[in-house]
Image (spheres, rainbow, N blue to C red):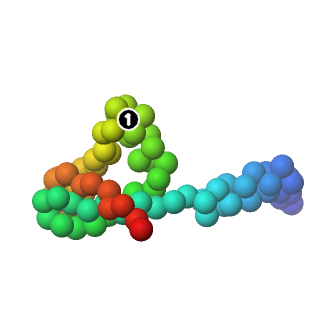
């Protein structure tokens, strides 16, 4: 008989809640114009290595071009 410990269950529930909180940022490729969704925490990680006023750029998964974030209104 398998018993799922309550500690395990709580941890799992917490991670699900965390996933719901993740903001998705939209990036648009400067070269092919395609859009891609990037989780905010990934962008923040990129930002860590940049200067204050530098913009995070990601590589386009379609053409390897440069993608920049589209500011959401
Ligand atoms: Zn592209």
Q: Can residue 69 be seen in this view?
A: yes
Identify residue for label 1. 52
Q: Which of 41 and 50 is in front in this view?
A: 50
The residue that appears at 75% across and 51% down in the rendered structure is: 11
- How many numbered marks does the figure carry? 1
Residue labelled 1 has its Cβ within 8 Å of some atom of ligand 1: no
The residue that appears at 14% across and 64% down in the rendered structure is: 32
Q: Is residue 12 visible?
A: no
Image position, residue 35 (x, y; %):
28, 66
The residue that appears at 36% across and 61% down in the rendered structure is: 71
Quadrant occupied by the N terminus: bottom right
* Residue 15 falls in image quadrant: bottom right
Left or right? Give the position of 46 relative to 20: left
* Mark 1 residue crowding within 10 angstroms, few (<14) / some (14–19) / many (20+): few
Quadrant occupied by the C terminus: bottom left
* Residue 3 falls in image quadrant: bottom right
């Amino acid at each position: 008989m398998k018993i799922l410990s309550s500690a395990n269950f709580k941890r799992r529930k917490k991670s699900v809640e965390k996933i719901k909180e993740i903001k998705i940022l939209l990036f648009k490729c400067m070269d092919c114009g395609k859009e891609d969704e990037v989780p905010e925490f990934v962008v923040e990680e990129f930002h860590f290595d940049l200067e204050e006023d530098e913009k995070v750029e990601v590589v386009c998964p379609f053409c390897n071009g440069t993608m920049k974030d589209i500011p959401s209104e």
